[in-house]
Image (spheres, helix red, strand yellow):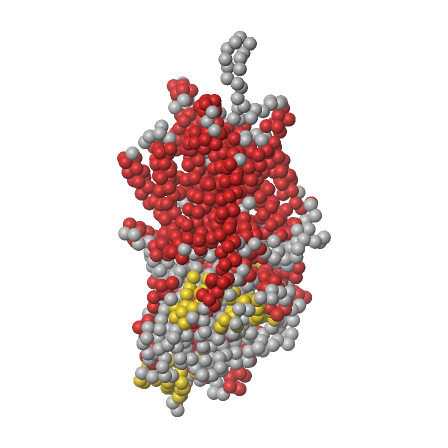
Amino acid sequence: MLGYILRRLGSTVIVLVLVGLFVFSLLYIAPGDPAAIIAGDTATPQDVEHIRQNLGLDQPFVVRFGKWGLGVIQGDLGRSIYANLPVSTMILERLQPTVSLMVVTVLISVLLAVPMGVLSAWQAGTWTDRGVTALAVLGFSVPVFVVGYVLAYAFGLKLAWLPVQGYAPLREGLWPWLQRLILPAFTLGSVYIALIARITRASMLEVLQQDYIRAARAKGVPTIAILFIHALKNAAVPIVTVIGLGVALLIGGAVITESVFAIPGLGRLTVDAILRRDYPVTQGVVLVFSFSYVMVNLLVDVIYTLVDPRIRY
Amino acid sequence: MQRRNFLKSVVAAAAAPAIATRLAMPAIAAPEKARTLRFVPQTDLAVLDPIFTPSPVTCNHGYYVFDTLFSSAMDNIPKPQMASGYTVSDDKRTWHVTLRDGLKFHDGEPVLARDCAASLDRWTVRDAFGQAMRDYVDKFGSLDDKTLEIRLKRPFPILLQAIGHADAQVPFIMPERIAKTDPNTQIKAADMIGSGPYRFKADEYQTGNLVVYEKFEGYVPRSEPVDWAVGGKIAYFPRIEWHIIPDDATANAALLSGEIDWWERPISDLLPALEANPDLVVERANPLGNMGQMTLNHFQPPFNNLRVRRALQMAFNQSDSLRAAMGNDQSLWQVCYSIFPCGTPLATLDDGTWMPHSIEKGKQELAASGYKGEKAVFLNATDQTVWRPMGLVSVDIMKRIGMNVELQETDWGSIVQRRPSHEPVEKGGWSAFIASGSSTNQMSPMTSILVKATGAKGWYGGWDNPEAVRLTDEWINATDEATREKYGHELARVAMSQVSCIPLGQFFTKWAYTRKITGVMPGVCPYPWNVRPA
Amino acid sequence: METPEGFAVAPPLGDLLLASKPRHGFIRLVQRQPTMVLGAFVLLLLLLIAVLAPYLGTVDPLALNPIARAQPPSAEHWFGTDLIGRDLWSRVLYGARISLLVGFSVAILASAGGLVLGLVSGFIRALDGIIMRMTDGLMSIPPILLAITLMSLTRASVGNVILAISIAEVARVSRLVRGVVLTLREQAYVDAATAAGTRRPMIMLRHITPNTLAPLMVQATYICASAMIVEAILSFIGAGTPPTIPSWGNIMAEGRALWQIKPFIVFIPAAFLSVTILAVNLVGDGLRDMLDPRMAKTI
């Protein structure tokens, strides 16, 4: 097992290098000159050139990539062109909100979607099944920002149950932190819930047809126990896969959710950086995302072994 | 069955605290909230250094943290602010400005003349007015700790107007060691030390999300009543938070639900609903507003031909363009067929000779101009809510007078990157784009981009006109106000008849705030002084 | 209970799964996959709308009339007008073209690209490692961010949007195809073909590819749905289809600030988009259930 993990980590390094090269190259050839944008409307071309030199944007590709790469190895992701702050500082600042949002979303989604999928599989073919499935597919279909707007309007403005925007760090209290994450989590989770429910249903369907389920029934095991203990555990592998892969999806949706609910997270930081041509921030964040994605996948693979004893590396 | 009930009870349990908290919130939270002003600025405060960037939101931030030697209000007459007075030598080449007593920086250090000298020196490198001034200045120095000395190579009569400039870039005063930073490098957040009424809290600053200011107890306001940034700037709120909310609908909801107090720039379509709300006040932010202009590329066809420019200028209809940008509410825009903004001293209204807003006349002029169908490329910024509709109307007008025009819509950043190009349109060049500026900047020949006539060394588009350059010089060097105004009007006439660019009229923005605060004053920026709980 | 022969037999238990009665032909299809047929029907309707847009009472979707901005639905403008006075009914109907075009094009492009990559990767061991690492890398970048970055490289156009989203989706398809190839490559009939002297490209074409088609088709429908959403999100951020060309994403993006007072500008295209994606998903689900229900356990 340890050997497997080590091999995977080695693989990760190669992947990250490729990602870094890819993103860096993309941004290098991108049109749009951050020096000109930041210099402002009344700057002369000499000013812009001066700023460009200060930012190191006039050097050749290899030099810039080399500098950046060396910095990354030492933990220095560069400096934001706009905010003049270290990229790593900015990322750390924004990490808590995004991670909070993800965690709450995953929790809410799994707690809602898995039972939905189980219910749907158990009642397969009936209108309950079709209803739940349709509800789940609706989660895929409605764009994330529409869900966000509707929830914010209904629960934030009209009913005034929850705040419509903003983020409160955990240190200000559990409830302030949670209350501002509920609407965004449901918004972000709408796609995730649909995905998990669908996969749960499919996986459960297959498992429920097995003989050992019939045997358990014959033994008189109560239905709830059959569904959630015997069947679910065996159906878990694809469900766990999806939960892991879904994190990448979540990041995409997080970008919008953070914009709509004014959460100061990584998603918003990245979109702003890309559109403003703030290269160091974009590169740094994409690298961080890739790293997390790969780590999450590794975690998922390890969880497999816990869930399904037949899987061995 | 059990599972469903379980789910229901979970939902109920989750909702109850929310309702309870919401109901309990007003009583518990009120005292704290009354001491913090929550403001939503027009855009993200990305750059903190007001000398490095002319961006209006950074200028707003500058007014919180820094103070100025002189400042002007709407009448454009500079009045002392940090200064207590000034003298000019007989040969008019040496100016001495004395500082008031008791001025301190946020780190406790007193404000000295050398701080002012270094700050002004840095300012003159980046600001338009400052750059012009640099030609006249020999040295910024200090006579003693409380007297700033400006030695000139030749007389510069409008020096006070320059250093009393109220709009970006404002010559804010910083400590000498910080002012010595290269003007082409940004000052860091930790070095945001000024002598203004509010202190910037670098430890609570979250980029792209939250900016926090705290009242500076060591600030000594002047005794006169306050008007714009002139007079006694008295700070009331102990703490001001800038919440950056990029999504307009979210900011709207936040204002309505009481999560924020003051929203700098609601988009014009949301204003009617806000105006109808009895708990909110909606009023014009800057009485002079902003002025739009269409910048034309004088380096390449078709606009290198004076008569083609005239044709477009004759056909251009400011009402249509302003209405497209701002809507039907006429308190938000004003037609102004003048190179300098209406309501300012140098406004020179056209009598219909050059801007009759007639498509017919435009067509005739185009036909007589020798235009052979050369392609014009119009760059339009999709992410600019006001400029974009203006651009679309402009392209429409161009087509109607018979021009061959291609609309290229991109984000503003790409336009900024393309506009220095002098190439023909086939090689990625451009013919026209829309921009706007604050009227307080566009009202002076020193800072208005509509009258910059130094060709490639001037504004993008490169209008080259020696007569206009001469008139600008005369305006600077005029010895009395009447003569100066004469030259200003003359300059406006030249710019209009030679079509330096096309003025698009004035538009205004309104801000919205809750009736729980009062004392909000109109001006160039949303000033934090005078604002207090109602 | 007792059988006639006298054996003790357990009472018949209701199955955990309910049984269904078999029928034949089209009725059977409708009975077994009612949602899929519904989805296909809706898609067809939308296709018709998109194609026949000029004849369905529309005006030029680009014609602006700023005086009539943000009007609610009325007799003159069936869906109202947008922020610069363009007729929403026309823009939404023409918008169907873009959204459907983006969806289908991305599905086809990503599938084709992924098929080639997956076949090469699965079959030619030498290239497998590199391609795997590259697709890993590509997949680890969130697709939205990849699409935004790619879009920021070029001028906004429908073609570029299609390309950007396809690149973001290709990696997943190639993994799927590679998986199938790896399984099939060990099969006996492939050995037989190789022994008979069939060259590798022929094997790939004749034997492997047909087996990848089923999962590929299902995957393609999901990609189609995903592409339409991504296009909407890209437009929402301002990095999508150029704003003059009406797409549902664009229309929503432009009207978002007024969502609370003029909800129809966002709500109507949102409804159209949701219904379309729902339809595509239903078709995909049905295909998957018909072709190989086991695929339901993967995305």
Image quarter in which the C terminus of chain A is found: top left
Image: B194 above or below B431: below
At which x and y percent is residue B386?
56, 63
Q: What residue occupies the far bottom of the structure in this picture?
A: B90
Closest to the observer: B120 or B17? B17
At which x and y percent is residue A88?
34, 55
Q: Residue at point 51% right, 66% down?
A: B262
Q: As drawn, is C46 to the left or to the right of B467?
A: right
Image: C213 above or below B197: above
Image quarter in which the N terminus of chain A is found: top left
Image: A288 above or below B84: above
**Number of dots carrying numbers:** 0
Q: What residue occupies the far right of the structure in this picture?
A: C75
Q: Residue at point 54% right, 52% down?
A: A155
Q: Residue at point 52% right, 34% down?
A: A119
Q: Is residue B7 visible?
A: yes
Q: What residue occupies the far top of the structure in this picture?
A: C5
Q: As drawn, is C56 to the left or to the right of B416?
A: right
Q: As drawn, is A41 to the left or to the right of A11?
A: right
Residue B215 found in image quarter: bottom left
Q: Is residue C146 visible?
A: no
At which x and y percent is residue B336?
60, 73
Q: Residue at point 58% right, 47% down?
A: C270
Closest to the observer: A38 or B207? B207
Closest to the observer: B496 or A288? A288
Residue A9 found in image quarter: top left
At which x and y percent is residue A137?
54, 39
